[in-house]
Image: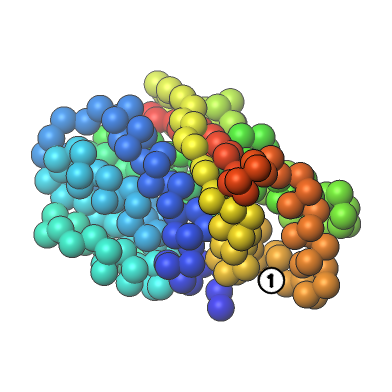
């Protein structure tokens, strides 16, 4: 199974938390009704569905390179104003669009500045958000801190090391390099609460996303060592629940 192919498994891992970030992100953009939106890397439709529910758009065009994610989004988002298409960030449609957004996508685009330039060409307002991989995205931070402890040879798998630009300064720098003059940023913090360690750990076994794909690549005994190391680090309450938070950084130009 591909790292990005199953919408249902991705939802259980991180899509459900993106759905908490999306309303604050859309409200921050404060766009008037009747706008034409493009959702780049729409995934399972978390951001698209929020735009439809809260921003009163004329239309939302969602694009993503994963056929599996597009199929999931089409089934999950039942609204005539939305349409979904298999496309990568390197082959965006011509538009024009009033608002071009990308949620949890920019770090997975190889030519980020080129993609932002293209978004600027076809959109009046361009905005993105990414997880704070190095610090504030706690469910991933606990995992990769444990990996660094028990498998230091794999520390470069850490998304915080791989995506160092996922900060306000890093995003502003990318936007300015892409030609945006007026750039604003903000943090969005949401709770990520798990009923038990199994509730936390099970999504890591699905292979969807960077950390789960890395875990799946290991021998079972090595997976178990990481699991135990993560469990030892987590703040597990007396009732077994785990209360974490996830921070995203947003930028708009």
The residue at the far bottom in this view is 1
- In the image, residue 223 lies at what x, y percent? 77, 67
197 or 223, which lies in front?
Answer: 197
Q: How is the image coloured?
A: rainbow
| Quadrant position of residue 167 | top right
Q: Is residue 114 left or right of residue 44?
A: right
Residue 230, given in percent of the width and then of the height, sits at 75, 52
Residue drawn at x 22%, y 31% is: 31
Asked if residue 111 shows in the view, the reply is no
Residue lying at 15% horizontally and 43% vertically, measured from the top left = 57
Report the residue marked by disc 1. Answer: 216
Which residue occupies the extreme front position in the image?
239
**Side (left or right) of 161 relative to 66:** right
* In this view, 8 is above or below 201: below
**The N terminus, quarter of image:** bottom right
**Does 75 sit left or right of 107 as displayed?**
left
Q: Can residue 22 be seen in this view?
A: yes
Q: Position of residue 178 (x, y in %)?
A: 47, 36
Q: Nearer the viewer, residue 100 or 152?
A: 152
**Residue 196, placed above or below residue 20:** below
Local secondary structure at mark 1: helix
Q: In this view, does 196 lie above or below 235?
A: below
Tag 1: Cα neighbours inside 10 Å, few (<14), some, or many (≥20)?
some
């Amino acid at each position: 199974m591909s790292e990005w192919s199953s919408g249902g498994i991705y939802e259980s891992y991180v899509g459900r938390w993106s759905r908490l970030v999306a309303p604050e992100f859309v409200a921050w953009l404060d766009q008037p009704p009747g706008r034409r939106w493009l959702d780049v890397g729409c995934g399972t439709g978390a951001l698209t569905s929020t735009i439809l529910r809260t921003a009163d758009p004329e239309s939302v065009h969602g694009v993503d390179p994963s056929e599996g994610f597009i199929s999931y989004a089409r089934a999950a988002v039942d609204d005539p104003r939305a349409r979904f298409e298999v496309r990568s960030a390197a082959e965006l449609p011509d538009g024009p669009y009033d608002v071009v957004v990308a949620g949890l996508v920019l770090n997975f685009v190889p030519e980020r500045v080129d993609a932002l330039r293209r978004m600027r060409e076809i959109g009046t307002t361009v905005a993105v958000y990414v997880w704070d991989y190095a610090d504030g995205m706690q469910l991933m931070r606990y995992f990769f801190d444990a990996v660094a402890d028990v498998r230091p040879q794999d520390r470069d798998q850490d998304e915080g090391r791989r995506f160092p630009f996922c900060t306000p300064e890093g995003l502003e720098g990318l936007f300015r390099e892409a030609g945006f003059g007026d750039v604003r940023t903000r943090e969005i913090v949401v709770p990520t609460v798990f009923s038990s360690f199994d509730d936390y750990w099970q999504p890591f076994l699905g292979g969807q996303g960077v950390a789960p794909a890395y875990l799946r690549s290991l021998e079972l005994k090595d997976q178990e060592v990481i699991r135990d190391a993560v469990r030892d680090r987590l703040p597990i309450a007396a009732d077994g629940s785990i209360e974490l938070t996830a921070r995203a950084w947003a930028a708009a130009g």
